[in-house]
Image: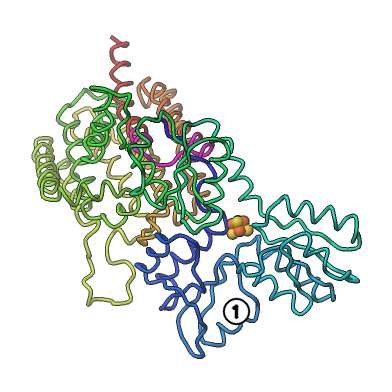
Amino acid sequence: MKIVVAKTAGFCMGVRRAVELALDAPSQQRQPIYTYGPLIHNPQVLGMFVERGVTVLEEIPAKASGTVLVRAHGVPPETKQQLKDAGFTVIDATCPKVVKVQSIIKSHARKNFSVIIVGDQDHPEVVSLLGFAGEKGCVVGSLAALQALPAFEQAIVVAQTTQNQILYQQVKAWAAECRSHYKVFDTICDSTERRQTEVRRLAQEVDAVVVVGGKNSGNTRRLAEIVREAGKPAFHIETEAELDGNALRPLQSVGITAGASTPTWIIKRVVRALEQIPSHRRYGIRSLLPRLMRLALLTNLYVALGAGCLCYAAMHLQRLPTSWPAVGVAMLYVLSMHILNHLTSRAEDRYNDPDRERFYRQQKIVLTVMALSAGALGLVVAFQFGALPFWTLLVMSLLGLSYNVRLLPAGVCPTCRFRRIRDLPGSKTILIALAWGVVTAGLPALSASGGQWGVGALAVFWASATAFSRTAFFDLLDIQGDRIVGKETIPILLGAERGLILLKIVLAALLVVLLAAGWSGIFSALAFVLTICPICLWAIIGRHEQRGMLAGMQLEFMVESLFVLTGLLTFVWLLAAF
Ligand code: SF4
């Protein structure tokens, strides 16, 4: 089944900002943490907030403490003041686009303009806008209501940001004709419009569309209606558990879109669940293949194969003879560390990849034995290489083992934020990359008699940067799930956009290093061939940016395959050299 994910699926800018502020609040602000009214119309996200200790404040008490987050719709100025007077610290998560409308109203109300708001009287955003208009504000929900108003001497007209475009066009046309002295502002946010235009186009391309979002979310329901109007079946679901396998199985292509209040982690779960639905049209090995791929990814056997391939390529970049034991050590180390990492980080997998979390919960004992045996076997093999490779691997293994372990006991330094290595911001992305670099490129150089330190160091940089781009890309895809569990990956520290720029800089550096080291003779000519890998990852990232391609098994498999590709390219290059 072909799965196409709409680029506009999920949080709009304003909702994303509000959710991120709410997710960061428990670790940064005075407790308890509240949102003033429900942050968004999505029961799963609201449930997740309760788990994180963020609850909804419906009434403002006379006296209180803690932090209150004002949601994206905003609040009237007097409500904000009331919250402060009660003793709360207020975090204003009002969407910048709503703030802009508030400022327009505020500045004109001061100059005695009447303020006409085209919107729904009871909508929280309209309530907040009205608060800035003071006594001169009024709300109209239709053209007839606007026409029924008296003619004001001076007035402005603004729209609720999610107002219907067609109605507002009519309002503008009438005002231009009958109240030409009114100042009319274009305040409708184009996020909803773009989402609807895209789903209309998507419905033409696929057999059916799965619409993900709260059943009580108006904008999500509208997306489902648009799909049906286009003559295609629409499946409106809140979570992957509601997917109708029988109805979806015969389909060849399925589109996925989501309302403005649907988080990426729920969309990703739906993508993964859809990938698990076996197609009617696949028989024999074709139906088995996705399951084998999934098993290879879940057990980390495919990642380990990738590490072995990277090691094989690193040896030949350095003109070292093939050492199959070194390839084995790289595979065993990566297998062991990645399994242990997933066993001890099930909290984030619960959001980013619930299937993996379930697998690790159910197979805990088998996987623990597998991880420890692989780690021990790797050390035994490395012992044959000599003292330095052995101790290097031992240190790397201890670092890996202690990554999720509390190094500072609860009683010691109660105010310390950093109790485990993983608490250090960005540590996951950097340490995984370094460990891959040392094990796949450094150990072969240390264990070979003809290894050179300078060339080895450059090979470690190449392998680390390659592993960094893989991990940083996955971190970008998992940014919301990681934020929920309070993990500080590099994309969370820098923000998604700057994280993406950093990733591209690393890929560009990889290309430059390979070309320069190949051209100067530091690396073998294999360096030129291996430039294919960063170029491929750049292409995958470009496609991800273009179409909003989300993490699914196919994407994960594709990225991991780039490591296998380094081994295949090396093998072909060696064959061609003979
Ligand atoms: S729909 Fe537009 S105005 Fe409303 S929160 Fe989202 S980005 Fe802001």
Residue 135 placement, left or right of 505: right
Q: Residue 455: image x %, image y %?
A: 33, 32
Dot 1, crowdedness within 10 Å: few (<14), some or many (≥20)? some
Which residue type carries mark 1? Answer: Lys
The magenta-colored residue range is 541-557
Please say if 365 is above or below 127: above
* Residue found 13% across the figure and 49% down from its top: 368
Element carrying mark 1: helix
Q: Which is more toward the observer, 288 or 338?
A: 288
Residue 399 placement, left or right of 237: left
Q: Which is more toward the observer, 56 or 417?
A: 56
Q: Residue 182: image x %, image y %?
A: 87, 63
Q: Which is more toward the observer, 202 or 70?
A: 202
Q: Please, what is the dominant secondary structure of the magenta stretch?
A: helix
Residue 320 image-quadrant placement? top left
Is 551 in the magenta? Answer: yes
* Residue found 73% across the figure and 69% down from its top: 139
Residue at numbered disc 1: 80
Q: Does residue 323 appear in the picture of this structure? A: yes
* Residue found 18% across the figure and 44% down from its top: 336
